[in-house]
Image (cartoon, rainbow, N blue to C red):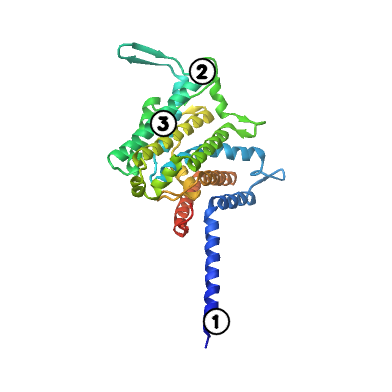
């Protein structure tokens, strides 16, 4: 028969094991995006094709291509995180990218005229790069305001309002471009040559400008979320909207601001898209909303709101970019890549059930 001392000793050991397990689980989930990135990176190295006794994946050019390809997803993830933090979701970002890319190409390349009241016919020549970029970014803010205001004013779930905007933005892009792609050229009479800088690589051709812009955007927004009242209130709304409202937080205004930021960054991604492809097309960016949501969720954000970091979102974007690159280098077709992304997203969401509640 076991003594009381033995029972107490066993209980103490079990409690220590339980605490150790909880600490380990806490550590894993706290840095899950970084662990995921490391794992995917080493898998890519392990299965990388070899050319001239060198791993293609680790070549300078290929790694530069990975950062360039993930720039748009990274920018989209920054905006999508703002909406997910307030327990919303934006399904329109892919269509906004297409609209922004189409609009950018149109403003850079086409002449237009407007019949304004009291002024008459106004001829608008192709815009300089800075004005075209500013116009499209303002368009992104306007789209975000509309989706956010509609959702809040009429108490419509953001899933519905952004699904509607997905259709509206894509349709406007088709109307704007007459259903054709608008090419961007820098010959005489073409687009402002300054716009071409957005598709270039700097520092001896190593760092793509789109990736640099993405990192700058991510750092700025990370500081905003970390140190400004706006960031603390965004987390508070996602954690408990009712409590935030009773605490004096301007919930409606901040949720609209989150949607405005999301569409603003989607417009920015559309500008980068047009610069890299030298065209704007209403048929581009299909499925980009999945990429942005997957990046944020892989980065550890909760779809219930209130939890997530920009470091995690960027790490999630890198995971997706490396995954795409890894599969492409091994000649895996694009349809299979979509299946893998979908399964990865479901797995990431399922893992949230094991996430300790106290992890931010």
| In this view, 276 is above or below 338 | above
Mark 1, residue position = 6
| Residue 336 appears in the figure | yes
- Secondary structure category for the residue under label 2: loop
Mark 2, residue position = 190
Mark 2 to mark 3 CA distance (whole Å): 25 Å
Identify the residue at image location x=35%, y=47%: 241
Mark 1 to mark 2 CA distance (whole Å): 85 Å
* Nearest to N terminus: mark 1 or mark 2: 1
CB-based contact (under 8 Å), mark 2 and mark 3? no
| In this view, 23 is above or below 79 | below
**Closest to the observer, 208 or 144:** 144
Identify the residue at image location x=53%, y=24%: 195
- Secondary structure category for the residue under label 3: helix
**Closest to the observer, 255 or 127:** 255
Q: Position of residue 144 (x, y in %)?
A: 38, 34
* Nearest to N terminus: mark 2 or mark 3: 3
| Residue 338 appears in the figure | no
Mark 3 to mark 1 CA distance (whole Å): 67 Å
Q: Position of residue 15 (x, y in %)?
A: 52, 70
Q: Position of residue 338 (x, y in %)?
A: 48, 46
Give the label, 1 or 2, closer to the camera. Answer: 1
Q: Position of residue 11 (x, y in %)?
A: 52, 75
Q: What number is the disc on residue 140?
A: 3
Give the label, 2 or 3, closer to the camera. Answer: 3
* Nearest to N terminus: mark 3 or mark 1: 1
CB-based contact (under 8 Å), mark 3 and mark 1? no
């Amino acid at each position: 028969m076991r003594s009381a001392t033995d029972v107490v000793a066993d209980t103490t050991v079990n409690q220590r094991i339980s605490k150790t397990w909880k600490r380990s689980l806490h550590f894993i989930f706290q840095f899950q995006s970084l662990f995921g990135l490391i794992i995917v990176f080493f898998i890519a190295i392990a299965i990388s094709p070899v050319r001239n006794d060198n791993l293609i994946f680790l070549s300078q050019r290929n790694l530069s291509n990975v950062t360039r390809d993930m720039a748009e997803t990274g920018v989209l993830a920054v905006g999508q995180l703002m909406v997910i933090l307030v327990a919303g979701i934006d399904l329109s970002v892919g269509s906004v990218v297409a609209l922004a890319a189409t609009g950018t190409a149109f403003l850079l390349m086409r002449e237009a005229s407007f019949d304004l009241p009291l002024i008459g016919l106004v001829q608008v020549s192709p815009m300089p790069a800075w004005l075209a970029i500013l116009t499209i970014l303002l368009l992104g803010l306007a789209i975000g305001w509309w989706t956010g205001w509609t959702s809040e004013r009429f108490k419509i779930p953001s899933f519905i309002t952004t699904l509607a905007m997905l259709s509206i933005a894509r349709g406007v892009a088709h109307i704007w471009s007459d259903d054709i792609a608008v090419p961007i050229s820098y010959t005489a009479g073409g687009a402002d040559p300054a716009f071409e800088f957005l598709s270039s690589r700097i520092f001896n051709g190593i760092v793509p400008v789109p990736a640099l812009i993405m990192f700058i955007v991510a750092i700025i927004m990370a500081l905003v979320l970390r140190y400004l009242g706006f960031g603390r209130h965004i987390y508070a709304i996602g954690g408990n909207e009712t409590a935030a409202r009773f605490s004096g937080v301007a919930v409606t205004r901040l949720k609209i601001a989150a949607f405005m930021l999301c569409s603003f960054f989607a417009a920015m991604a559309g500008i980068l898209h047009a610069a890299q492809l030298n065209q704007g097309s209403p048929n581009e960016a299909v499925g980009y909303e999945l990429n942005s949501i997957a990046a944020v969720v892989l980065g550890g954000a909760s779809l219930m709101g209130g939890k997530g970091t920009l470091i995690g979102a960027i790490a999630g974007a890198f995971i997706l970019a490396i995954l795409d690159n890894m599969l492409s280098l091994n000649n895996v077709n694009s349809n299979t890549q979509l299946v893998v992304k979908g399964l990865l997203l479901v797995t990431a969401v399922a893992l949230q059930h094991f996430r300790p509640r106290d992890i931010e």
